[in-house]
Amino acid sequence: MQTLSSQEATMGTVIALDQYRMRKDPEGELRTLLAPPPRINDGQIFARDYSKLDGIVFAVLKIREILRYHVQTNEEWQYLALQVLDAAYHFDAEHGALLGEATASLKNYILEEMDRRNGRDMTAALLLLDLVEKAPRHRERLPARDG
């Protein structure tokens, strides 16, 4: 009779745990390889100024990170996210409604894709959209510089 060392027994347990995880969520490992889980930090979100371009870009990239991880089957959100970025960048009194329309479209998409599993991350994406949408109303638009 052959006895296993404690190290060999532990390795067998780890392998069995990985097999168990694959049986419970076979697509989970593939999803993690394709798009890592989003890192959402309240400090990052609330420390940004969403009336400036770098804050807007951060918000859109964070939303992209969330949607890449949670929505694998439909890529309509990519176009919607670009519309938000474009509308926020070109925001002024004449085009203010465009930003509201763009964020509303992306919010509706996020709400359709939200479920119990991804609710926390999707809520963060909705919060980011609200921050982008509301911030430009209080900013002063600086004239564009040439060159």
Image (spheres, rainbow, N blue to C red):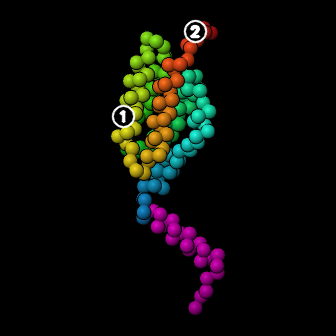
Residue 69 visible in the snapshot: no
Does 99 sit above or below residue 113?
above
Does the residue at mark 2 contact the one at mark 1 (Cβ under 8 Å)?
no
> Which tag, 2 or 1, sits closer to the chain's start?
1
Residue at x 59%, y 77% (from the top left corner): 9
Q: Quadrant of the C terminus?
A: top right
The amino acid sitting under disc 2 is Pro
Residue at the image point whose x is 61% and y is 39% from the top:
43
Q: Which residues are magenta?
A: 1-22
- Asked if residue 13 is among those painted magenta in the image, a careful observer would answer yes
Could you say which disc has been placed on residue 39 in the image?
A: none
Task: Please state the horizontal and vertical placement of residue 115, each as a whole percent of the image.
Answer: 38, 47
Q: Which residue is mark 1?
A: 108
Which residue corresponds to the image point at 40% horizontal and 50% vertical from the top-left?
116
Q: Which residue is rendered at x = 50% and y = 19% of the image?
A: 137
For the residues labelled 2 and 1, the Cα–Cα distance comes to 33 Å
Q: Main secondary structure of the magenta part?
A: helix
x, y (%) of residue 14? 56, 69
Q: How many marks?
A: 2
Compared with 50, 17 (above or below) is below
Q: Is residue 69 left or right of residue 114?
A: right
Q: Position of residue 21 (x, y in %)?
A: 47, 63
Q: Which residue is mark 2?
A: 143
| Residue toward you, 26 or 92 | 92
Q: Residue furthest bottom?
A: 1
Position of residue 58 in the picture relative to residue 123 (left or right): right
Residue 100 placed where, x, y %?
A: 41, 23
Tell me the element at label 1.
helix
Quadrant where the N terminus sits is: bottom right
Q: Amino acid at mark 1?
A: Asn
